[in-house]
Image (tube, rainbow, N blue to C red):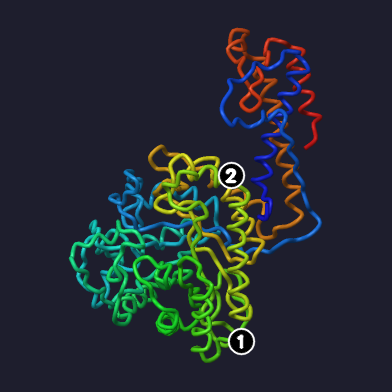
Amino acid sequence: MAGLLTLVGCLVAATVLVQLLLGRLVDSVTNAPPEPMPRRRRQLPPLSRAAVRVRLEHWQTASRLRDTFSCVSMDWWPAEKCDYGMCPWSEASALTADLEDPLLLSALRALAPLHLRIGGSLADQLVFTGVEGAPPCEDLAVDQTRRVGFRGGCLPFSRWLALLDLCDRAGCGVLFSVNALHGRRRDACRPPDTPCRRLSRGERPPCCTNYSGGWDSSNLDAFLRATAAAGRRPAGIAYGNELAGSLGIEAHLPPEEYAREFLSLRALVDAVWPSKQPLLLAPDASFDSVWVEAFLSAVLQGDGDGRAGNRAGGSGAGRGRGRGRPPIDLLSYHVYPLGAGDGAQMLARSLDYRKLDASVEKIKLAARVVNASSSGTVVPAISETGGAYNSGRSGLTDSFVSGFWFNDLLGALARHGHAFGCRQAILGGHYALVRTRDRDFAPDLYSMVLWRRLMSPKVEGGLAAAFVKEVAHLEAGFVRAMESIYTTMSESVLNALRRRLPITKVKFDWDNKAAVHKLAASLTAAKV
């Protein structure tokens, strides 16, 4: 597999290996062959006969990461956001989520330091209230004539301060997506109730995505100046969301226009924060190499001293955007390697190494294009990935199997020079890392925690040593726990525990003291 083998991937393989070891030891002690499994069509070979090989390479450093490689997203979607008959966004919006929830705080603190991206498809219609000259607030409402399915929405300044306070407590920096369509007008459709949200690409008329007019930055200007006056500053600001070229959703803006208005954003940010400016990101859209090349060319040529500079390092918010710093810090884009959340073959795709390799090739392409187009001054970053778009897929992007695509992606991003990979989403959808409904964490959160603790800041030889150490620790604990269970539980309880092992389906005779002793001793002596 082209993606870098991460620690979590190794632990997955180790879990299988331990189960195979258990199966073989049980078989050798009890001499009782496993009961035949019921025949199924196209059944995979029994895992007891599957060859598993784990290779640990530990003699070179593959990549160096930023302290803020970890990143999660908090979206704007309201509870009315539904996909494929399911509505998994209750109390998950950045506008309504409980920012005092200890479960949310503990998840963010476990990943700190990290970026918290606040943005998504609705970012380009939100207005900012509670500041000078703010327009009237129109509440979010379902609107099938819009490509994103909603109209309206506003962010009160008080809520914005609460989001910044959340990151102060949790140890994260806010990456904030701002409205790049404010001031533009969408072409009128005929009939007015044309369902742009539901129409396919071939059926959709141009009016659904055609916008005219220029960007009006006045509302954002007042909002950022109020933020600075309050002594606050986000870690980064992203211009727009999924508006770039033919792959855009709500609009298809050309690269030259996007670059011109991005430079206006840069001038605004530099005026508000003359020193220690936030990172600047764009376009937060699906990667289109032709569009990106044209956009970066226009941005760098339009900036007086932006073409010669050094790569932004660290959090990027610690120095002024003076001589030597490019006008754009990060070329941000979105990746959903499993496709739409209603895909019939999503599980198969998530386990198909060829599909995973295809995603890695896209990441490598993005790194090459951005590096070549900016002479290495701009860094690529994935600002949104959740496996499957349209809220993910229940039973897949919220389950253990999601780790196959996600861990492979983390390794590929680290190996190919990306600043971070922002996981969609910390709350909401079928890819939520924090599940408020059952008060639990998704498996992918543990993947991120392990990555944070064992892989940062270098992706290198420490992986092998850390992996062996972690497996040895878990293995020793398992042996102690098993011996404790045997010595303290009654025979009736032990009889009830006689069951199939989860992978090999071999029954273990817990009443056979010799078997238990031999199993414990063998596990203690086993080497991975």
Q: What amino acid type is highlighted by mark number 2?
A: Leu
State whether residue 334 appears in this view.
yes
**What number is the disc on residue 351?**
2
Instruction: Identify the amino acid type marked 1.
Output: Ala
In the visual, does 173 lie left or right of 313?
left
User: Is residue 111 depicted above or below 15 in this figure?
Assistant: below
Q: Residue 517, located in which quarter of the rendered image?
A: top right
How crowded pointer 2 is (Cα within 10 Å; few <14, some 14-19, many 20+) is rated as some
Which sits earlier in the primary sequence, circle 2 or circle 1? 1
Instruction: Locate residue 317, reporting x and y percent.
Output: 53, 73
- The residue sitting at 70% across, 38% down in the picture is 14
Whole-percent x, y for residue 523 in the image: 76, 27
Disc number placed over residue 308 in the picture, else none: 1
Classify residue 120 by image quadrant.
bottom left
Judging from the image, what secondary structure is the residue with disc 2 in? Answer: helix
In the drawing, does residue 458 fall left or right of residue 421?
right
Quadrant position of the C terminus in the picture: top right
Q: Position of residue 298 (x, y in %)?
A: 49, 85
Q: Residues within 10 Å of mark 1 (few under 14, many from 20)?
A: some
